[in-house]
């Protein structure tokens, strides 16, 4: 593992399996839901570890994934698996990340634009720098929401093949 990985704004892994990263995976602590889905392609496909399954939205835009935690958690990064070569116009190109104490008070914390992604992309949830200038601050929230603002080639529905929520390094 690259010793400078913690200071990189984006970490890309072309491997189909989730990358081994220093940040703890806190995904299982939350309750997952999606804005819409085609039967058999729901929120469970985001976390099943199988790159051949995916969440397939089936409703009006924007599409979103919501993770609700039972208590406030520190969220450092999101790791998302997208595949433009496989999913074409179903591949997200712009993501907005929101966080808050509940579904009614979510605030935008980050926007990310991706150019034809293929593999796992890991990035900070926050865009606010640490006081010591070393990396970015974690976001403290009960609710995290990933909004698919746009897809490549103006696609309507979306495919996300994997998603993990990562806490700060202890």
Image (cartoon, rainbow, N blue to C red):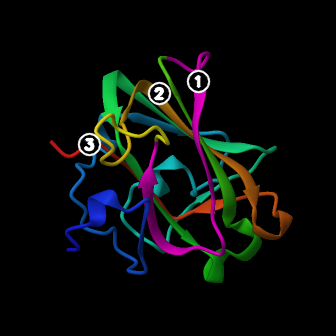
Give the residue drawn at x 75%, y 61%.
151
Q: Which residue is mark 2?
A: 143
Q: Which residues are magenta?
A: 102-125
Q: Helix, strand or loop at disc 3?
A: loop
* Crowd around label 2: few <14 · some 14–19 · many ≥20 (10 Å): many
Residue 106 colored in magenta in the image: yes
The N terminus - image quarter: bottom left
Q: Nearer the viewer, mark 3 or mark 2?
A: 3
Q: Which residue is mark 1?
A: 106
Residue 38 visible to the viewer: no
Q: Earlier in the sequence, mark 3 or mark 1?
A: 1
Q: Nearer the viewer, mark 1 or mark 2?
A: 1
Give the residue drawn at x 64%, y 76%.
84
Q: Nearer the viewer, mark 3 or mark 1?
A: 3
Furthest residue to the front? 132
Give the residue drawn at x 34%, y 68%.
18
Q: Quadrant of residue 112?
A: bottom right
Q: CA distance from mark 3 to mark 2?
A: 16 Å
Q: CA distance from mark 1 to mark 2?
A: 8 Å
Q: Which residue is mark 3?
A: 168
Q: Is residue 84 above or below residue 42?
A: below
Residue 49 visible to the viewer: yes
């Amino acid at each position: 593992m690259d010793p400078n990985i913690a200071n990189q704004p984006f970490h890309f892994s072309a491997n189909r399996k989730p990358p081994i990263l220093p940040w703890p995976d806190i995904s299982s602590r939350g309750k997952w839901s999606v804005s819409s889905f085609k039967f058999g392609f729901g929120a469970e496909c985001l976390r099943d570890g199988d790159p051949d399954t995916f969440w397939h939205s089936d409703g009006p835009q924007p599409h979103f994934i919501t993770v609700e935690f039972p208590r406030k958690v520190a969220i450092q990064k999101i790791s998302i698996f997208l595949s433009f070569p496989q999913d074409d116009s179903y591949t997200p190109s712009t993501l907005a990340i929101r966080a808050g104490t509940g579904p009614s008070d979510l605030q935008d914390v980050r926007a990310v634009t991706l150019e034809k992604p293929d593999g796992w992309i890991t990035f900070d949830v926050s865009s606010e720098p640490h006081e010591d200038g070393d990396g970015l601050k974690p976001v403290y929230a009960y609710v995290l929401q990933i909004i698919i603002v746009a897809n490549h080639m103006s696609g309507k529905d979306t495919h996300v093949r994997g998603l993990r929520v990562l806490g700060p390094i202890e």
